[in-house]
Amino acid sequence: PDDVLRVRNLTTRFHTSEGQINAVESVDFDVRDGEVFGVVGESGSGKSVTALSVIDLVDSPGRVVEGEVWYRDADLAEEFRGSDPDAVDGDFVDVRRLPTGVRRALRGPAFSTVFQDPMSSLNPSLTVGEQIAEAVEVQRRARANPRRTRSRTQGYGLGRFLVDSLLPNRSYASESSHSRAVELLEQVGIPDPAERAEEYPHQFSGGMLQRAMIAQALAGEPDVLVADEPTTALDVTIQAQILDLLRDLQEEEGMSVVLITHDLGVIARMCSRVGVMYAGEIVERGTLADVFESPVHPYTEGLLGSIPDLEDPAPRLRPIEGNVPSLLDSEMGDRCYFADRCPRAMHDCLTRIPEYDVAEGTDEHAARCVLAEREYDQADALPADYF
Ligand code: SF4
Ligand code: MG
C-alpha cells in the first residue's frame, strides 16, 4: 500500500518557567493506506504531543518548531505546486506549510481524533445526536466550498460556526445532518440510535460514550484517524469491543489509524507497524514482527521483556529500572537519552545522539541506537556505576 502520511523530523518544544521542554525530537514515521500504525511508550514519552503535532493542534506554550508533515492529497498538491513548490512533493503537501485556513479545513476530511476521555470532549448540555450532527454540518459546509476559496478565506469561518454551536438551545445542524448523525451512531454499534441521539452525554455509559466520540470523529470521513489511548479509561471487556469496532471501521472505510497507547497488548492485537517512543524520540520502528521479534534498541527489549505471550490479554509496559528522563533541555545532553538506564551503554553512546539506522538485513526496520550500526563491545562498556 501507498503512504498517506510521511512525518519527517517533527520537533515540538514547550517554553515554561522552568525552561525549554523538548517534548518531541526529530520524529520520523510513515503511515500507509488502510493500516493501523501504533505508537507505544510510557506516559510522558511524548506520544500525545506527537499526535497533536501531526494534526496541527499543539497549543501555547508548545510549538512545533521544525519538521514536515506530508499528507497525500493530489488536488491540494496541484493547487500549491505553482505558488509554493516547497510545500509540494509529488502528490503530497507539507501540511505545516499550507495557509492556516487550508490547514484548519483538513481537520475532519483528512485528520480526525479520538481521545481517552470522552466526557472532556463532549458538551454536557447538548444531546449526543446534536453534537454529532454539528460535526457533520461543519464538514458539509466546508465541503460545499471549493478549495480555491478555502485558501483565500480563513477556512469559511469554521470558528464562527463552532461558537454558534456552543450557544445553548440552538439547533445549528440541518435535518439531513441529524439523520446522518443517527446513521453514524448506528455504524459505531449504538443500539436504538435514533432514541439514543436524543440523550445527553451523562446518560451514556463509558463504552457508549467512546462509541459516540468515534461517530463524531467519522463525521468528516477522515483519511487518518488519530486515536490517543482510546480504550485506556474503559474496563477490559469494553476495551476489546472498542478495539474491534476501530478495526472494523478501519477495514470498512479503508481509513488509516494512528493508534497511541502504553499497552503492548493493544499494539500486538491491532497494528501492522509500530514506533516505540522514549524521551520524545521514536527510538525504534518497523513492522510488528521486526520490532516485537527482533528488537534492536535495548529500551524496546526491556519493554518486551514482560510479554512472552502476545495472546496475553493485558500485558503492560514493564517498568524499567531507573528514572523516566527529564525532557528539560538544560538536563538533556548530546547523547543517547536512554544511556543512564541502558544495560549495554558504551562510551560511544555518550558522544552523539544516535541517528536512525536501518538494521542490517531488514527492509525498513530502524533504531535510534548505536547497536543498529555495530555490535556491543564489552571493552567500550561504561562502568556500572558511571551515572
Ligand atoms: Fe543503549 Fe547505547 Fe543504544 Fe543508547 S545508543 S540504547 S546507550 S546501546
Ligand atoms: Mg498521553
Image (cartoon, rainbow, N blue to C red):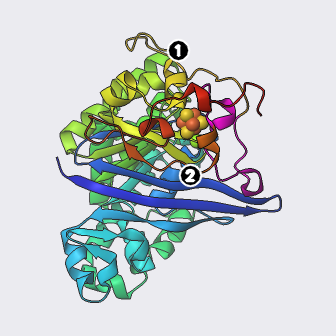
Residue 185, image x, y percentages: 33, 40
> Which residue: 44% across, 10% down?
308
> Which residue: 26% across, 38% down?
249
- Callout 2: helix, strand or loop? helix
> Which residue: 62% across, 53% down?
23
Looking at the rendered structure, the kind of residue marked 1 is: Ser
The crowd level at tag 1 (other Cα within 10 Å; few <14, some 14-19, many 20+) is some
Look at the numbered disc 2 and say if its residue's Cβ is closer than 8 Å to ligand 2: yes
Range of the magenta residues?
Answer: 324-346
Q: Please tell me the numbered disc located at residue 180.
A: none
Instruction: Say which quarter of the image contains residue 240.
Output: top left
| Left or right of residue 166, residue 89 in this image | left
Q: Quadrant of the C terminus?
A: top right
> Which residue: 70% across, 40% down?
325
* Disc 2 target residue: 49
Residue 258, image x, y percentages: 38, 44
Looking at the rendered structure, the kind of residue marked 2 is: Val
Q: Is residue 327 magenta?
A: yes
Placement of 126 over or under 152, stated as above or below: above
Q: Earlier in the sequence, mark 1 or mark 2?
A: 2
Distance, label 1 to label 2, CA atoms, is 26 Å
- Residue 304 at least partly seen: yes
* Disc 1 target residue: 306
- Callout 1: helix, strand or loop? loop
Ligand 2 rendered quadrant = top right
